[in-house]
Image (tube, rainbow, N blue to C red):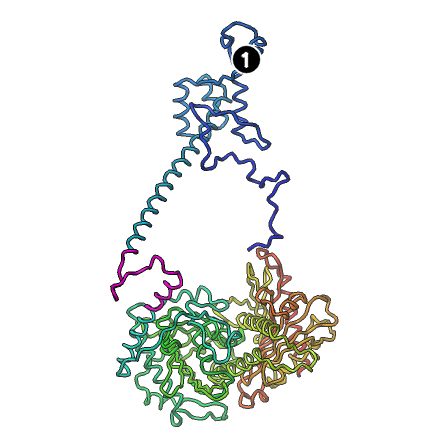
Amino acid sequence: MIPARNMPSMIGSNGNINGFASSSGLTLGQPNMMEAGHLHPLDMATNTSESDIARFRDDDFDSATKSGSDNPEGGSGDDQENRRPKKKRYHRHTQHQIQEMEAFFKECPHPDDKQRKELSRELGLEPLQVKFWFQNKRTQMKTQHERHENTQLRNENEKLRADNMRYREALGNASCPNCGGPTALGEMSFDEHHLRLDNARLREEIDRISAIAAKYVGKPLGNYPLMSSPVPSRGPLDLGVGSFGGQPGMGGEMYGAGDLLRSISAPSEADKPMIIELAVAAMEELVRMAQMGEPLWMTSLDGSMTVLNEDEYIRTFPRGVGPKQNGFKTEASRESAVVIMNHINLVEILMDVNQWSTVFSGIVSRALTLEVLSTGVAGNYNGALQVMTAEFQVPSPLVPTRESYYVRYCKQHADGTWAVVDVSLDNLRPNPAPRSCQRRPSGCLIQEMPNGYSKVTWVEHAEVDERGVHNLYKQLVSSGHAFGAKRWVATLDRQCERLASAMASNIPTGDVGVITNQEGRKSMLKLAERMVISFCAGVSASTTHTWTTLSGTGADDVRVMTRKSVDDPGRPPGIVLSAATSFWLPVPPKRVFEFLRDENSRSEWDILSNGGIVQEMAHIANGRDTGNCVSLLRSANSSQSNMLILQESCSDPTASFVIYAPVDIVSMNVVLNGSDPDYVALLPSGFAILPDGAGIGDSGSGGGSLLTVAFQILVDSVPTAKLSLGSVATVNNLIACTVERIKAALS
């Protein structure tokens, strides 16, 4: 919607709407102004149309061409004027003249000056007479056409009214096929009608799941109470302890699921029985892999993770889910943790594509639910089945993303444990589309624990193509730490702490700068969450991104891309230039994270702070680690005194982020009062810190770091403007100087 202040004024000084005041078109319902070949005289108005002027000129012309025979009594004109009002006389064209002009009108309703002069010469008329006749004729044709359309619409309206009455009578006399009693659909409320439709659909779901259960379990499912109505999907920050909500994301989209994901078609009806069988088999395999120990699972040499014994896997699961592609490598890992969230909410996050993409935004760059085959039974996600496609990422332009097309299946087991499994569907078709990742049964088991906690056991098992990974990230990716179970569990644990802090009510009031307003905390965390998602979605080597490499020294190359921001309330309009580079530092990730997040050391690397002191105005802690928080910063030497810096810093053993964006004070005050933060424009920049693959077993305290620096800058506020080479050079210099300052400070 265009803001009112940008709309040009369309109201003239005389009260008419500009561009419409002089229209000579006739509206529906006006009387026909042409009878017997001439128009009735009209009163002259301030805005007189061309056809009106034509009529007055015609009157003057006819009066000037009157002959003396118009005075039958032979008296003078003055005498006649005194005796009676002068009667206007209109010129009558001959039948021949009318026929000729009618014929010409059919060929050319808008003759030019040359054609009018030629026609007037042939017919013995003045050019003005010809011009006015054609104007009147066009007006007459337009009126006739509108009258004809009116008649047609009136007839259609009557027909629809008659059909409506007939259907009402038929519904009023209908009887219920179940009880034989009268029905009253015509008087049923809109909501009740839709509830009945939902009821019928859910019964069909139960019948279908019962048939599947009878096939694989040996007995049908019992009857369950039905949900009266589906609960709309919500964001993770809206979750309440012990609550259930949300249908699976039916075609849900998260931050840039673009044409590539949409081009993947939903499964055909012929594929659905095979998908169901594959999902049931994958669920059985996942549960066994999550529970079995040696010899299927072995501890890695550095003791940091559990790895799969591939020979034992083939012996234990001979069926598999299809052959491995040439050049692909197997990645398998398992990890467990106790997280601060109840099992029902965890299942909801995993089964709602929007919540899942938000919680795992550092790993999932794009995701889409293509089709929901089952929404589950008994008012929850037990038996839910959905076909999905997703793109998994490492926050660096040097690591290609992994696309996967798979089915996700959720099931509640007899002991109360929930399981959610993914398995690729690429092998359903004879010639599957080449993808960089095929997921063998992967997912998690969720066990209920006391006090709202849950134990999560995560299994990641995939066959992947690692040939496009840059040498800088080879060790991290090949070790399985970049996309493995440890990263998924660590991210989930950190996000559960973040959600718990967002809903906390016992905030200590003594600390300076702590935001205690519950609604203000929630709005600020929601704004920071969008900032993190935007940063993560824009820093990876996604298939939707076209990075251009600027000159550098190989690994330190700066990659840039541009995009146009139009009609997006969450971003400023114009051309946005993104620039990113990744490099290695001989410093442990924890030290890099502490240096970059600390406002006291910000002036050492932030060129835009002009070397001034940066102060923390307010903060919200969102985890056990003191470094996990959302802060509001202010630079003392900043040239823009009305701007603040919103920053979120978060860290876990597998990845750390320091992400920030400038925001104006007015917008931030609105957010802190609890208002909707979705309309605050953000352009996030920041850092993604990953271990280099050598020191992960030390919880980020050993080994080196892989640091990605990314900036987003508005280079022009006009979306249609051309990007100048000067803007690219400026951003390139900015990122190069920042990298050099960080290296100098940490080395």
Please tell me whether mark 1 sits on a helix, a strand or a loop.
Answer: loop
User: Is 169 contained in the magenta span?
Assistant: no
Q: Quadrant of the N terminus?
A: bottom right
Q: Quadrant of the C terminus?
A: bottom right
From this viewpoint, which residue is outermost toward the bottom? 294
Q: Is residue 155 above or below residue 522?
A: above
Q: Where is residue 215? Give x, y as percent.
A: 26, 80
Q: Residue at x 49, y 25 (%)?
A: 40
Query: On the rendered structure, is 731 left or right of 279?
Result: right
Residue in the foreground of this view, choosing between 740 and 155: 155
From this viewpoint, which residue is outermost toward the front? 181
Query: On the rendered structure, is 209 left or right of 127?
Result: left
Q: Where is residue 326? Give x, y as percent.
A: 37, 78
Q: Residue at x 30, y 80 (%)?
A: 221
Mark 1, Cα crowd under 10 Å, few <14 / some 14-19 / many 20+, is few
Q: Where is mark 1, residue-wise?
A: 84
Circle 1: residue type: Arg
Query: On the rendered structure, is 98 left or right of 609?
Result: left
Q: Where is residue 28? Give x, y as percent.
A: 45, 37
Q: Where is residue 702? Give x, y as percent.
A: 58, 89
Q: Residue at x 51, y 5 (%)?
A: 73
Q: Is residue 73 above or below residue 457?
A: above
First to last magenta residue range: 172-200
Asked if one can make out residue 333 in the rendered structure from this viewpoint, the answer is no
Quadrant position of residue 368: bottom left
User: Is 196 contained in the magenta span?
Assistant: yes
